[in-house]
Amino acid sequence: MHFDLAHAAGSAIVIIATIYGLRYFGVIKEKKGWNWTLFFAVFIVMAIFNLIWPYPS
């Protein structure tokens, strides 16, 4: 089994940047629980990230 640490680190950076970006622009607030906006934003950003940099690099 191959585990690409660079891809995992890049994914983490992209997810954290998405969360902070959405909070900075006021799209999401500091609330607890499930947030569909955050879910779909991370899903779309990760889909684009994986198109640019496929997992088995």
Image (cartoon, helix red, strand yellow):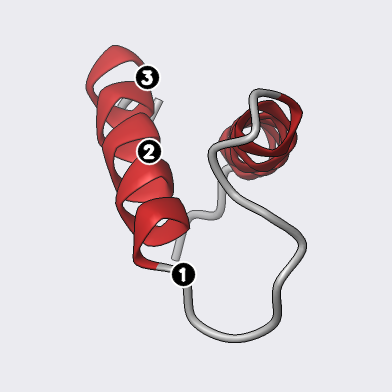
Q: Report which residue position mark 2 lands on.
A: 46
Density class for disc 3 (Cα within 10 Å; few <14, some 14-19, many ≥20) is few
* Circle 3: element type: loop
* Residue drawn at (44%, 66%) of the image: 1
Identity, as a three-letter code, of the amino acid under mark 2: Met
Looking at the image, which is closer to me, 14 or 2?
14
User: In percent of the image, x 54 and y 38: which residue is there?
Assistant: 27
Compared across the picture, whether 47 is left or right of 39 comes to left
Residue drawn at (31%, 30%) of the image? 50
- Seen as rendered, the residue at the extreme bottom is 33
Mark before the other along the chain sequence, 2 or 1:
1
Q: What residue sits 26% from the left and 36% below the top?
A: 47
Rendering quarter of residue 31: bottom right
Secondary structure type for disc 1: loop
Q: Nearer the viewer, mark 3 or mark 2?
A: 2
Let me know if residue 55 appears in the view: no
Residue beneath label 1, please? 35
Q: Residues within 10 Å of mark 2 (few under 14, many from 20)?
A: some
Mark sitting earlier along the chain (3/2): 2
Residue tagged by mark 3?
53
Q: Indicate the quadrant where residue 53 lies.
A: top left
Is residue 30 something that shows in the picture? yes
Q: CA distance from mark 3 to mark 2?
A: 10 Å
